[in-house]
Amino acid sequence: MRKIPIILDCDPGHDDAIAMILAHASPEIEILGVTSVAGNQTVEKTTLNVQKLLTFLGLQVPVAKGRPKPLFRELIIAPEVHGVTGLDGPDLPEPGFPVEDCSAVELIARILRDSERKVTLVPTGALTNIALLFIAYPELKNKVERISLMGGAAEGGNWTPAAEFNILVDPEAADIVFTSGLPITMAGLDVTHKAIITREDTERFRNIGTKASGLAAELLDFFVTFHEENFPQFGGSPLHDACAVAWLIRPDLFTSVHKHVAIDTGGELTTGCTVTDMRAFLSAKPNTEVLVDVKRQEFVDFLAERFSMLD
Amino acid sequence: MSNSGKKIIIDCDTGIDDALALLVALQHPGWDILGITAVAGNVGLEHTAPNSIRICTLVGQKIPVYAGAAKSLYCEYRSAERVHGANGLGGIELPLGYDVEQESALSFLTRSVRENPGEIEIVAIGPLTNIALAILTDPHFCENTGRLTIMGGAINGGNATPAAEFNVWADPEAAKIVFNAGIPMTMIGLDVTNQAILGFDVVERWRGSDNTVVRTAGELLYSFHHFLDGIGAKGYALHDPLTIAYVMDPTLVTTQEMFIDVETKATIANGKTVADIFKVTGNKPNVSAAVDLDIDRFLKLFVNAIEGYSKV
């Protein structure tokens, strides 16, 4: 099988962690490197979480730390969602390896240069590192196959009424990425709010009895509880970031529409809004595959299958 | 005319669907329409004020029409001529039976509301410039207005831009003032008006009618044709008539209380009515926003209203 080479750019983050487990467990995917970004927590904490997760999973790939702040703004973090560590809940081992002696954007650039094949970028946090890559090394755009990201929404928001968290954290970076001309898949709230994991699903994962499924269940215990207390209407927890990985492997689980998406960066209310031209008013060509629906049960079955494939 | 009906002021930018909305309103027996205030919008004020008179003339009525704001509060003027035609009525010529009032729309709005505290329902189906000016100039306007129902905005999407509905986009600063004024308010937005579609067959039937009003209604709607073909529409979206129909019979539309504010400083999303669906702002609801409608009952009401003119 010809594997899909990817770089995970993330801010773990409970759902980032599950996206990582899913990618690692999937034979269709080859993780070339993992970079951290500030968002769910400070970049110090998200980097440490990346190291701990990879140590726990026994996955040896280069890791580099991203910038401490968004391109032009102060950092917003989400401790109310992910806790003070950014990954509250499971007990994870201390890091068994150091991070690379270079920045996240330098590591991504190195991997792209060294790769014979085009690489898919999978950002599940703010788009700071990816935007910097395109500004600093525009020639490397042609080494990028696609960007499959978690962020944004054709409709609504989760941090402001108009903006999803990852885009809101660094809207200028998102603007740079969405105007990059590269193919983008947007796993936004339109689909992730339908990718709901319930308590029963969590127990099912736990009962698989592997190390990876146990970790996934512990992460979900925390995440489901947060959503039950704050957003009971979901009946569980949206598993945002895993959608960006799952689409690469099983696009058949998802419904998508090809639309033009632009980022608002100046609004008092709409900064960070991924303005999606659903009715194709603009002459602008579609730039984004917008995921709008997922077959929930099959998605859960798929996760269970993958969690059972790791020790 | 009896004066015992519900007191209504219609603020509009007539406009084809405004014209149809007026036709529905003018035949409603339960209403006492105190006046029509015109605003620039679909086309300039030099058309929207006389067009309102032309529609009243068409049905043999003489509701006073007041000229309001000729331009938006703060942004440049944005017309919808390409949709409504240069004269706002799709190029159709209708006789003008009487003159626009000397009193301004602003003066009429504030005076009427002051003289009838809590009793007047304002139905605003154009840009909200006149209403915002009334709020800004009369400190008692908000508390004395019984209710405001607007056609404008959308919880999701837009029709002037991907993010904004035309009436709000045409004067976002005015809309922002109105949404934050504390007036009891209902928003009939694109979420429902885009579902209020009249089939081409009805319009064809009306165009062949012996009755002048019914035939004119058919011709007015038919003049949208060139535009609708361009966007692949399945019929005529009755934005403004639905808003009038809702005020007649609120059971036609399901509403939900929510906090909605208007974006005015954006790079892309100006004029977006930002609806706090997930209650992330902590702000109390300020609007009853339309989320669903009974399409069949609405269309029945609308068709009966227009065809009622041939039975008088």
Image (cartoon, rainbow, N blue to C red):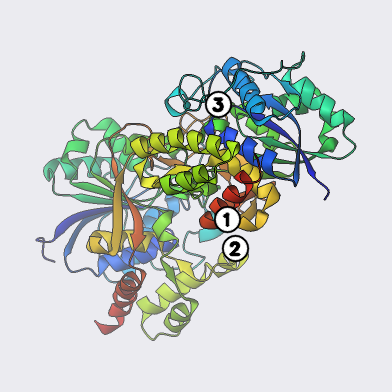
Q: Residue at x 64, y 51 (%)?
A: A259
Kind of residue at badge 3: Val
Q: Quadrant of residue A279?
A: bottom right
Mark 3 is surrounded, within 10 Å at the Cα level, by few (under 14), some (14 to 19) or many (20 or more) other residues, namely: many
Q: Are marks 3 and 1 in contact (CB under 8 Å)?
A: no
Q: Nearer the viewer, residue A232 or B48?
A: A232
Picture quarter with the C terminus of chain A: top right
- Give residue B18's mark: none
Q: Which residue is mark 3?
A: A169
> Which amino acid type is shown beneath numbered disc 1?
Arg
Q: Secondary structure at mark 1?
A: loop
Marks 3 and 2 close (CB-CB < 8 Å):
no
Spot occupied by residue B290 in the image (x, y as percentages of width and height): 34, 54
Residue B243, quarter of the rendered image = bottom left
Chain letter belonging to callout 1: A
Comes first in the chain, label 3 or label 1: 3
Whether pointer 2 and pointer 1 mark residues with C-beta atoms closer than 8 Å, the reply is yes
Q: Quadrant of residue B225?
A: bottom right
**Residue that carries the numbered disc 2 in the rendered image:** B231
Chain for disc number 3: A
Q: Position of residue A250 (x, y in %)?
A: 67, 53
Disc 1: which residue: A279
Residue farthest to the top? A101
Tell me the crowding category of disc 1: few under 14, some 14 to 19, or many 20 or more residues within 10 angstroms, Cα based.
some
Chain at numbered mark 2? B
Q: What residue is at 51 percent from the left and 36 percent from the top?
A: A164
- Mark 2 secondary-structure assignment: helix
Q: Picture coordinates of residue A117 (x, y %)?
A: 87, 40
Q: How many marks?
A: 3
